[in-house]
Amino acid sequence: MKKKADIKRILLIGIPMLVLAIGVKMLDEEGRILWFERNGTEFTRARFYLFSGEKDRAFRVKPSEDVVIEWIPELEKGSLQLSVKRPSDAPRVFTEKRDTYEFTVKERGQVKLKVTGEDARGKFEVRWRKE
């Protein structure tokens, strides 16, 4: 009987603590607490309790491709922004408002996406498509 009680205690206390510890990531000045992320070939999304730091993604483009990027943030507190760096252009920054960015690629390279958060709580999604 005592073994069953010990196993139940481990399951009820130990596993939630382990899940919480896995969800907490602290590196240098970056912090992610209860960070859940999903990435696909044409999107990245994350839900979090606390996000201070950066999340990077990139995708390849060819000349004369039309690219559409959708920024869909939902914040409860803090700040969140998306920076889009096209090949050979200065980055364009989007803040906490939902936005769409369309452009035609001039040269082959990578479009770099960087989401930056500061004491942010909520979620975001970035979708892109090439036409």
Image: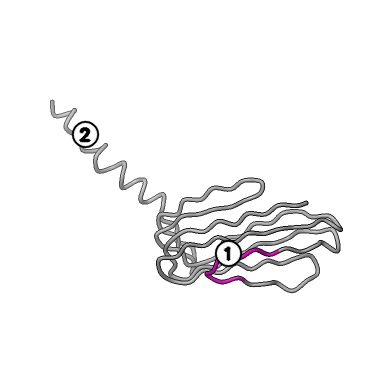
Which quarter of the picture shows residue 106?
bottom right
Left or right? Give the position of 94 relative to 91. Answer: left
- Which part of the image, by quadrant, shows the N terminus? top left
Identify the mark nearer the N-term, 1 or 2. Answer: 2
Gap between marks 1 and 2, in whole Å? 41 Å
In the rendered structure, are the residues bearing label 1 and label 2 in contact, judged by CB atoms less than 8 Å apart? no
Residue at position x 63%, y 72% from top? 93
What residue is disc 1 on?
115
What range of the chain is rendered magenta? 94-101
Camera-near label (1 vs 2) is 1
Residue 115 image offset from top left, x and y in percent: 58, 64
Helix, strand or loop status at disc 2? helix
Query: Which residue is more in the foreground, 59 or 94?
Result: 94
Helix, strand or loop status at disc 1? strand
Which quarter of the picture shows residue 25?
bottom left
Query: Which residue is more in the foreground, 87 or 95?
Result: 95
Q: Amino acid at mark 2?
A: Lys
Left or right? Give the position of 67 relative to 32. Answer: right
* Neighbour tally class for label 2: few under 14, some 14-19, many 20 plus, Cα within 10 Å: few
Q: Label for residue 8?
A: 2
Residue at position x 71%, y 58% from top? 68
